[in-house]
Amino acid sequence: MSGAVEPHHGGVQLRRAAWATAAVFAGNGFLLSVLAARLPTVRDLLGVSPAQMGTILLVGSLGSIIALPLSGAVIMRFGLRRTLLVAIVVEATLITLAALAATAGSIAFVAAALFLGFGASSAVDVGMNLQGGRVEQEMGRTLLPLMHAGFSGGAILAALTGSLTSRLGIGLVPTVGTVAVIVMVAVLGALRSFLEPPRTAGDDRKHHTRAGAAWLEPRTLLLGVVVFAAGITEGGATDWLTLAVVDGFGQTEATGALAYGLFLAFLMVTRVFGTRLLDAYGRVPVLRVLTVVAAAGLALFVFAPSLELALAGVALWGVGAALGFPTGMSAASDDPLRAAARVAVVSTIGYTAFMAGPPILGVLAELVGYRQALGFILIPLAVAFFAVGAARPVRKR
């Protein structure tokens, strides 16, 4: 195999690239979540039932799942900056068009806009994780968990924005459109500081044709298992924790929201400080410990006889769920020449868990209740405990 043309970057350039990547993470979280924060408005404008609203969102999720495995090949073919430039413009435009279609009362156009917009967001997602992994490699320290914390911060900002604009009576289109413009401008500015992935010194076309081979690599698939477990552990809390507290303990919706806030708080704090643990002790020991912590927290929440003990379980659940996803992405980026294809594979598996896992838990909840249904997450966590060995660093090629 021919060697890689991999330029050396100075400290200032690397710091700029790190901040720029964090900005893209936060911006994408802000953009993707602002429409979600106003979903009650979308539902009322369209006049749809909860089941119909779920179907519309499922169509959007399918666009994302279809685009994820293709994103790595597109980045390898056209370059990281160029792909992300087009993807963020398309994503921002289509998310705004979805809001406009909702105002016009068109269910079909909302679903179509979300399908294409979420598909563009997949390219942004793979690209920002790929860039985060590249910056980690260049700087020699763990950074992706911090960047994923930025995504969560953007989502929280979107929730606050949605709440405020709703209270002030600001319409859906002005809200979503303004956020889309802000994010698009910020991301386009940040892309100027991105580092392009290294390229082979020989014939790149041969490299591109092997993009699908990542689906046959045992290590990459095992990383997908780790990220799948992390995705369903976090996604289960996002979709069902509030309802599990309300129905399982007879609490108000406000109490359920506070429980989810507790989960997010411990998730974000662990991502902020977890980078030190990963650098000090290594990926595999830290992930194994956190997998046990997540399982213990979930079990405590599911079987706790009181709300107080259940909330302690929520805190442990948030800690344990924090690092699996970003660390899996980081491990997929270990070899820069294969990073784009591998990150695309791991992202596809992980986001399938985010999108498909919660509906499956919803079906189980009809049989055993919301709180007990969440206990089924213990199964993928047990499998992930034995798969985390795949996260050991590999040599760059």
Image: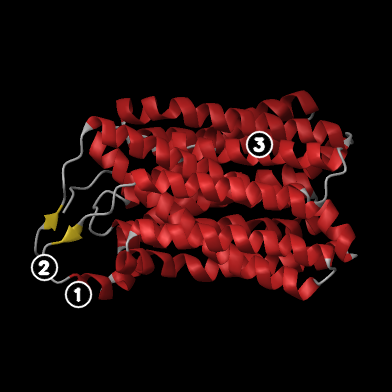
Q: Residues within 10 Å of mark 1 (few under 14, many from 20)?
A: few
Whether residues under marks 1 and 2 lie with C-beta atoms below 8 angstroms apart, the answer is yes
Split into 4 quadrants, where in the image is the N terminus?
A: bottom left
- Along the polypeptide, which appears first: circle 3 or circle 2? 3
Q: Which residue is mark 3?
A: 157
Image x and y of residue 369, in percent: 80, 50
Q: Determine the residue positioned at 55% across, 63% down.
A: 90
**Kind of residue indicated by mark 1:** Lys
Image x and y of residue 37, in percent: 74, 47
Q: Residues within 10 Å of mark 3 (few under 14, many from 20)?
A: many
Is 54 on the left-hand or right-hand side of 293?
right
Whether residues under marks 3 and 1 lie with C-beta atoms below 8 angstroms apart, the answer is no
Q: Determine the residue positioned at 74% across, 32% down.
A: 259
User: Residue 202's mark?
Assistant: 2
Is 358 on the left-hand or right-hand side of 296?
right
- Which of discs 1 and 2 lies nearer the camera? The answer is 2
Q: Which residue is mark 1?
A: 206
Split into 4 quadrants, where in the image is the C terminus?
A: bottom left
Q: Determine the residue positioned at 60% across, 64% down.
A: 117
**Kind of residue indicated by mark 2:** Gly
Q: Determine the residue positioned at 47% across, 65% down.
A: 68
| Element assignment for label 1 | helix
Q: Nearer the viewer, residue 234 or 208?
A: 208
Is 274 on the left-hand or right-hand side of 334?
right
Does 382 sit above or below residue 319? below
